[in-house]
Image: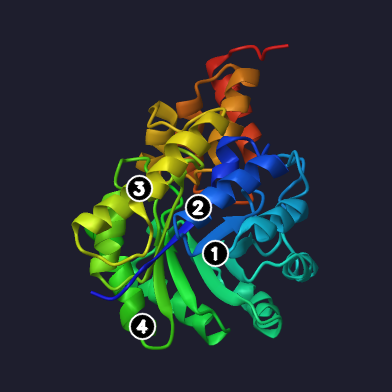
Amino acid sequence: MNHIRLNDTTLRDGSHAVKHQYTEGQVRSIVRALDDANVEMIEVTHGDGLGGSTFNYGFSKTNELDLISAAVDEARNAKIGVLLLPGVGTVEDLKEAQKRGASVVRIATHCTEADVSLKHFEAARGLGLETGGFLMLSHRISPAELAKQARIMVDAGCQCVFVVDSAGALILEEAGDRVKAVVDEIGGEAQVGFHGHQNLSFGVANSVLAVRNGAQQIDGTLVGLGAGAGNAPIEVLATAFDRLSVEHGVDVDNILLAAEEILRPIASRLPSMDRGSIVQGQMGVYNSFLFHAERASERYRVPTAEILREVGRRGYVGGQEDMIIEVAVNLREAAKVPASS
């Protein structure tokens, strides 16, 4: 079996779990540990990507460009990557990240909206960046439809399209079939990757199936730190792929050390498969909605899980975080519960 690349997104997706409060010192220590473990690509930005530090998504403690600079300064071998969501981040943000030393960008869109990424891929290739494409909430459409969206990204200059299980909703063959469809469409022209979450506890298993169906890049985070119930833990992925004789280059002893001795003491809250995050997986709700729903639950005195269940029924996608308030208000009014002061 060919070598796969394990990407670490503790300092991007994991930012959701720490409410975007990473300090420069923490970024330096995490990057140093990941680099010592031979992780090839480390993603660093606000959880919602470049430009994500806003009232709607949550303000970062430290300017993300300074965090990128710190990560680049610490990494001896690893590439430093960034995430960009069109409509949140801009081409100008991407240019600034490249000036700070970022060499990889993953451009993320809803799974049916790959066409909004075209100018961003063009800009990224013009800057000489390695490019990846995120098709978020990939459970929302069929494998064949997902493959068509992947084609749009590849034709725009994307070098690796990721099947992204943003809600942790995919189960086994649901993940494998989507990866295979994308591989069948773009294999030979671009790589295929997989980004899994743990809402229904299938993040690691789905990642294994993704590789067996042709995926060449797999995402994970230290101790599974991430939105919702968290990501597939990179230290578990590395260990599992070792057991399966899948070459990945990550030093298992050092990645276990990074998880246990570097990340755990830093994390203010570790993700868990609690009722809210399980409902996200059940209903296919975008994982970064969890904290927004928890805040609305406290303010409007309606259960977090019920808010998320209704969000799922309405089919909201990333970027519609403000609609969670409307859901909470409607549920409160239906239950005739007064809001907290």
Q: Which residue is at 29% across, 55% downward?
A: 206
Q: Nearer the viewer, mark 2 or mark 4?
A: 2
Name the quarter where the N terminus is drawn: bottom left
Residue 179 place in picture, x, y as percent: 32, 69
Of callouts 2 and 4, which one flags the residue occurring earlier in the amino acid sequence?
A: 2
Whether tag 1 and tag 3 are in contact, CB under 8 A, the answer is no
Where is 158 relative to 64, above or below?
below
Q: Which mark is residue 78?
A: 1
Kindly check if marks 4 and 3 are in contact, taking CB atoms under 8 A apart as contact.
no
Rounded to the nearest angstrom, the CA distance separating label 2 from label 4 is: 33 Å
How packed mark 3 is, by other alpha carbons closer than 10 Å (few <14, some 14-19, many 20 or more), is few
Q: Are marks 2 and 1 in contact (CB under 8 Å)?
A: yes
Where residue 82 sits: x, y (%)?
A: 63, 62
Looking at the image, is mark 4 or mark 1 nearer the viewer?
1
* Tag 4: amino acid: Glu
Residue for badge 3? 253
Whether residue 126 is visible: yes
Question: Mark 2: which secondary structure?
Answer: helix
For the C terminus, which image quadrant? Answer: top right
Residues packed near mark 4 inside 10 Å, few (<14), some (14 to 19) or many (20 plus): some
